[in-house]
Amino acid sequence: MSARQRHLKLDLAAGRVELSHGAGGRAMAQLIAEVFHQALDNEWLRRGNDQSAFDVAAGRMVMTTDGYVISPLFFPGGDIGSLAVHGTINDVAMAGARPLYLSASFIIEEGFRLADLKKIADSMGRAAREAGVPVITGDTKVVERGKADGVFISTAGVGVLPHGLDLSADKARPGDKVLLSGSLGDHGVAVMSRRQNLAFETTIQSDSAALHGLVGEMVAVAGAGLRVMRDPTRGGLAATLNELAQQSCVGFRIDEDGLPIKPQVAAACELLGIDPLYVANEGKLIAIVAPEHTDAALAAMRAHPLGREAAIIGEVVEDEHRFVQMTTAFGGGRIVDWLAGDQLPRIC
Amino acid sequence: MSARQRHLKLDLAAGRVELSHGAGGRAMAQLIAEVFHQALDNEWLRRGNDQSAFDVAAGRMVMTTDGYVISPLFFPGGDIGSLAVHGTINDVAMAGARPLYLSASFIIEEGFRLADLKKIADSMGRAAREAGVPVITGDTKVVERGKADGVFISTAGVGVLPHGLDLSADKARPGDKVLLSGSLGDHGVAVMSRRQNLAFETTIQSDSAALHGLVGEMVAVAGAGLRVMRDPTRGGLAATLNELAQQSCVGFRIDEDGLPIKPQVAAACELLGIDPLYVANEGKLIAIVAPEHTDAALAAMRAHPLGREAAIIGEVVEDEHRFVQMTTAFGGGRIVDWLAGDQLPRIC
């Protein structure tokens, strides 16, 4: 290879990803340097090892992972890059933990535009810097045209648990309150509005956000009263509560009147024939809180920018059937069942 | 949903993955329970949270990730499941660290056979148990038919670094020795032998294996002398040495006579018109070792089942051009350059 070739930069305007970008040779080294390291730059990536090291204090840590296959890749309020940072930070934070570091694995389809890859990597870097949770190690694979769909990202995250905290899905108890940090369905509706076969006009943006700051405030004032936290992503509030009901062997009673749903989201859901309770969120959390800690937790949530609209939306009840029941706005009742089928594929 | 439907088991013989298996509802919970938790069973997965917690002592940890897109999914000596465990354990181990835990993110194509998914999950569980490194958290996504290629897996891993160890790609120094743990090219040749367009007969099996036990022995006797370790996967020995040459600003001189290559691998490579130096390995490591620690490191390697054929294959030299030079069997010399292009796509 001549000196000239060696210093030729990637064509980030018009270039495309080729199989050689995943083959372990010089093209891959260049892609990683000019796209990923450029965007995610930090002291760990700069060392160029296949793994990265960090110091920890003695204690309890958590680890999580999520794959992101969202379609389309770019949507109002975010893209697959920011989502892959926020979503995994949130899964760490839902344990009550403080997220420390992320890893990122990219699976890219041959022919994908380098300009789009750069946009995604840049967005990922921005989200990681804003959250203060760096991506310290990664991997890139390329598959043939038609063997993937643009780009898939899997991120993993690690974090540290404050002493004594042990939130778990099996810890909801009758009498506990159900707190929700804000409005439902924004992410799902924003993404659906850009689906090729559906495209409709909406001003709704995805709520995609990193919730660890909000969680930190809640842990500080109500840590001992936190039973479970979950971010209601795929399957929405309905799937999350049904899962928790199974895992804790309880029921839930939810008040429809108390559910924060934006009028534009309600309208879009009506148009699409879907129920906002089943629509994915990416910047909201549900907390099951012991009754005596509810006021403190709610006040802490409302004092945080990402929890301003927080509300108590219901409570945990004894129920051998493990039903999620909702008191409707008209005073009636209905069962909020598990999602059947695939209402909203590839929403995250 | 009736009680009967609720208790219907997945059809693991003839069933296929559907989009609903990734939608966050009951079908997904069932797939996770009957395929993944069944295969990977451990105390963490049983708790059913979106993240898992573990205790750590104060010290230094490492984190890594790799995506696996190998084609075909099943090959002589392994499959994508065992590979995704071994590969990520090895990336942790190459820092000299002791792997603790793995995460796994599955991206599955709609229509993929449940029987194959179960085979992969079972193989993953077996590999994790044999290595003593459990998969403690995971995620499952399903994409439409034609939007992936069967199944992709991204695993991340964390481990603990023994005190004082700081291996890094920039630490090779002139005079250091290059140690290789065993024969080259087995994995790549085994996989290529099953490619639809190439299929040929060979008795070669992939060398896919977890190397952390071998690394532990090396660290114990020669920890202070270990500069860098790498597993020569994509791009093989050639890519690994060229990368290290760049990162450490040195050259390498390798002796062709000293390279362990099985006759069947050499024959297959000749048939395919490829050079075994560029072929992927999944159970081998290269160690750059300070001269005074070489004998101890080599003896430790040879005493371990995965390092019986370990050899000193060359040394680090001063070279402003950062070339990897090879003395050939006939006494001549040649430059072993970076891999150009995509000789062996989707080999891991």
Image (cartoon, coloured by chain):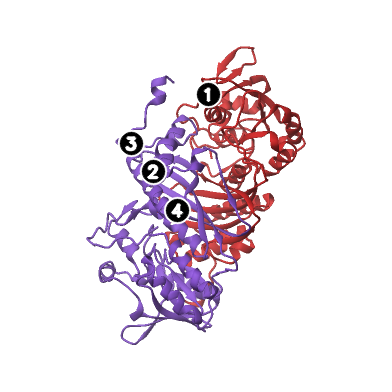
Chain colours: A red, B purple
Residue beneath disc 4: B132
Judge depth for marks 4 and 2 and give the one in front. Answer: 4
Residue beneath disc 1: A273
Relative to the observer, which residue lies in front, B30 or B217?
B217
Residue beneath disc 2: B146
Judge depth for marks 3 and 1 and give the one in front. Answer: 3
- Looking at the rendered structure, the secondary structure element under dot 2 is loop
Q: Label 1 near label 4: C-beta < 8 Å?
A: no
Q: Earlier in the sequence, mark 4 or mark 2?
A: 4
Quadrant of the drawing holding the C terminus of chain A:
top right
Residue at far bottom of view: B331
The 10 Å Cα crowd at callout 1, few under 14, some 14 to 19, many 20 or more, is: few
Label 2, label 1: how many angstroms apart (C-alpha)?
A: 27 Å
- Looking at the rendered structure, the secondary structure element under dot 4 is loop
Q: Earlier in the sequence, mark 3 or mark 2?
A: 3
- The amino acid type of the residue labelled 2 equals Gly
Residue beneath disc 3: B12
The lab-note entry on whether marks 2 and 1 share a chain reads no
Q: Position of residue B203 (x, y in %)?
A: 24, 62
